[in-house]
Amino acid sequence: MKSRIKSLASDTLIYGVSTIVGRFLTFLLTPIYSNYLNGAEYGDAIYIFSFVAFINIIYSFGMDTAFMRFYDKDDKEYSKKVFTMAYLTIAVISGVVSIIVIIFADAIAPTLTDLKTGPEIIRIAALIPFLDAVMFVPYAFLRMTRRPYRFALTKLGLIFIAVASNAVFVVILRWQALGIFYSQLMANIVGALIFIPMISSHFNWKLDWKLMKQMLRYGIPTIPATLSSLILQIADRPILKILSSSESVAMYTINHRLGLPIMLFVSVFEYAWKPFYLSHHEDADAKQLFSRIFTYFTLTCAAIFLITGFFIEFIVRMPFIGGKFINPAYWSGIGIIPVILGGYFLNGMYNNFAAGFHIVKKTDYLPLSIGAAALTNIALNFILVPIFDYWGAAYAMLGAYAVAAVILYTFLRKVYPMKYEFSKVITIIGVMLVLYFTTTWITNYFTIWLSFAIRIFSMALFVVILRLFGFFTNEEMRKIVTLFRKEKK
């Protein structure tokens, strides 16, 4: 078990380091946007990108997920057929829809934005998801063949191109919202070109329509699940714009992005997690293995929550573009960050529970749970936003992810029964919450440097308390001590 957990941790670390660097580069766009775009421009750009994200789900048609489930590492010819049918389905669907959007861009633009460059933005926005789509299966292939280095370097390179392009188009040329879309287009073009050799070498011109039907039967149920999941992530922005203003969308989005540490960990964990459990589900101790991984997942999220919650305020006040890392106009929204972090942790729980349904190929359960959560999210937004503005959107996200995790776990007990270490999980969460609220309340009455020192002490106290509650075994403590001794040397 230890070697397999190390294998998962190793892949997660590789995905994680590159993604952290990539997210940090993307994070640098936050001060650029907050200082070079007004709230209305940035809000409209986010609004349009929310539709791009929905289109991406439709373009995939669930075939990237189907590819990962049908891929057979021991049968290269069969896997080439799987690759071909998945790629071809995605390319045809995305190509047709993108052409239609481009043709009717002039009519679509006024319904989404009042910007003068609206039609041009819509045409570019139609190309972005198409170029994203043709990379879905190649990225999935890299994950299933355990090539995290190439996956990570490719992703990182494209992010660097997008960030650098933003610096040119938004900061230097002052193309405003239009510059954001051109920057992403540049990165996607490069990405599509990079994968051409892989696609040509794995494409099999002997099309297997029977195989495609089997893959569609598995993949299509994941579409409403993925769409519903996306609703949980981005539907709050359009609703917030309708019920409040573009400025509130910008305020919410800027501070929502500051909650990226747990979102980042959940994302990189998922990159490694799905190919991991699809490769090890036949192991004799698979369920015990997955249970232990969930416990460590919770522990990691708790540590990230405390680090982010304690120190994010110090980060956003750092000098940067415009005098501050984040424009002071957005500081009043920092309070929603712990709520956002909690929502992302619950999303990570959902991803852990979803493994069982993919293993037994019963993906039709996923839309039921995540669909109910999506409806909950929409309902809570309409109820809470008129009262609490962007705070209402944050709490709606938290509540919706809680619904998703609870419902999916209920189904999981019938489909793929698991004995999770819930006593340890509850201990971790309980200690985390008590420490967070106690420390933040106490440090409100001290100077900034004393507050900083107390919060560092609380991080160490987190480990000590968990040890006292019996979370860490003697063997685990010895490994931790050994690790620190090595670092010291």
Image (tube, grey):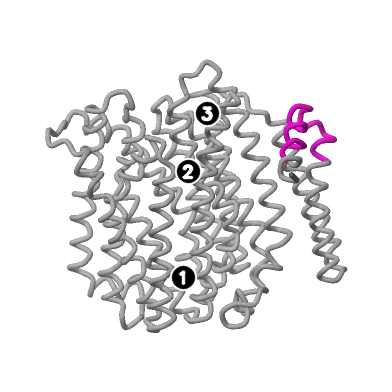
CA–CA distance between discs 2 and 1?
24 Å
- Of the two numbered discs 2 and 1 in the rendering, the one whose residue sits closer to the viewer: 2
Circle 2 residues within 10 Å: few <14, some 14–19, many ≥20: many
Q: Secondary structure at mark 3?
A: helix
Q: Position of residue 192 (x, y in %)?
A: 27, 55
Q: Residue at x 83, y 65 (%)?
A: 451
Where is residue 419 drawn, in percent x and y?
A: 62, 24
Q: Left or right of 290: which side holds 159?
A: left
Residue picked out by circle 1: 242
**Residue displayed at 60% across by 26% down:** 2
Tell me which amino acid carries mark 3: Leu
Q: Is residue 289 magenta?
A: no
On the question of residue 243 being in view, the answer is no
Label ID, residue 412: 3
Q: Quadrant of the N terminus?
A: top right
Q: Are marks 2 and 1 in contact (CB under 8 Å)?
A: no
Q: Earlier in the sequence, mark 3 or mark 1?
A: 1
Apparent side of residue 270 relative to residue 102 in the rendered image (left or right):
right
Distance CA(mark 2)–CA(mark 3): 13 Å
The answer to whether residue 197 is above or below residue 387 is above
Q: Is residue 5 shown above or below 156?
A: above
- The residue stretch that appears in magenta: 465-483
Q: Is residue 473 magenta?
A: yes
Mark 1 secondary-structure assignment: helix
